[in-house]
Image: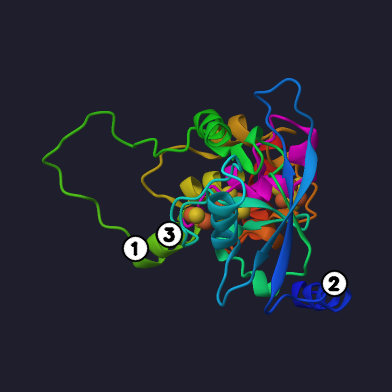
Amino acid sequence: MSEDEILARDTAVHGAATSGEFTLEVLRCNPADPEDRPRWQSFTLELTEGMTLFIALTELRETQDPSLQFDFVCRAGICGSCAMLINGRPGLACRTLIADLPSPTRLAPLPGFALIGDLSVDTGRWMRGMSERLETWVHGLDTERDPARLEAPMEPEVAEAIYELERCIECGCCIAACGTAQMREDFVGAVGLNKLARFHLDPRDARDDGAYFDLVGDDDGVFGCMSLLGCDDVCPKDLPLGTQIAFLRRRMARQAL
Ligand code: SF4
Ligand code: SF4
Ligand code: FES
């Protein structure tokens, strides 16, 4: 069933909100309070035209409950900080229109990341750990730095292919949708594999397949992936995650022979 068909089915069952009141059920939890237990809290608000989940949550915090925790920075699908489970599916709250959702809609924090509170999780620490582990920076061909040296030209097709994979906003949706990531704490996930595929493309990176195998040639890397492509389904930037994982797996499998 396609995403549109699922939405149409849910809408038929629950009724899409186009005007009037809308109900959000938010999974509340404050891990800083040892007495606090996770619980669903229901909020009702008046729907306005063009209202996104970001606008709705901001209104709730301003008018109903100032203690509600959630993250936003750019409000434009660029920073990746507003990802959450929207009716069980990872997505960006700032890019989700309330009118496209059934009422009530349930919001929960992304699984797979440390919970800060309510809908706010610490994706930053996870992403930094993954980046350090996979060394997601260009490993130069030259050891000596020369500030006067001219930049080396790059073929436009290569630059474009790199740019395509660089569009990752580190939102964490692919990790939240990934069965392996939920079972294996150290799994680098589609976000990590996509980053390595990006450096694999980069002619300025001196690492060979053997060096990449040392980083992801195990069950916490490309061989832990079950290829069910939940990551590919939910990536809000439509990154070609399935293709990149398949590519890396082929290259790493050759190294394992
Ligand atoms: S690969 Fe897609 S889903 Fe995963 S962190 Fe990057 S943008 Fe988000
Ligand atoms: S295809 Fe691999 S990385 Fe993507 S969700 Fe499935 S197990 Fe995770
Ligand atoms: S607030 Fe930046 S992606 Fe949603």
Q: Residues within 10 Å of mark 2 (few under 14, many from 20)?
A: some
| CA distance for labels 3 and 2 | 40 Å
Colouring of the image: rainbow
Q: Percent from the top left, x then y, of residue 209?
A: 56, 40
Q: What's the distance in space between the residues labelled 1 and 3, CA to CA?
A: 12 Å
Residue 181: horizontal and vertical position, in percent?
Answer: 74, 39
Residue 155 shows which numbered tag? 1
Q: Front-most of 4 and 40?
A: 40
For badge 3, the amino acid type reads Tyr
Q: Amino acid at mark 2?
A: His
Query: Which structural element holds mark 2?
Result: helix
Question: Which disc is residue 14 wearing?
Answer: 2
Which residue lies most toward the top here?
Answer: 34
Mark 1 or 3: in front is: 3
Seen at 57% across and 49% down, the residue is 61
Quadrant assignment, res 92: bottom right
- Residue beneath the point at 46% across and 57% down: 78
Q: Which residue has dot 3 on it?
A: 163
**Image disc number at residue 222:** none
SS for callout 3: helix
Q: Nearer the viewer, mark 2 or mark 1?
A: 2
Q: Position of residue 115 (x, y in %)?
A: 66, 33
Q: Can residue 224 be spotted in the picture?
A: no
Q: Give amino acid for label 1.
A: Glu
Specify start and end residues of the magenta stretch as a single range.
Answer: 167-192
Q: Earlier in the sequence, mark 1 or mark 3?
A: 1
**Label 1: few (<14), some (14–19) or many (≥20) C-alpha neighbours in 10 Å:** few
The furthest residue to the front? 63
- Looking at the image, the residue that sits furthest to the right is 13
Q: Earlier in the sequence, mark 3 or mark 2?
A: 2
Task: Say left or right for 88 vs 134.
Answer: right
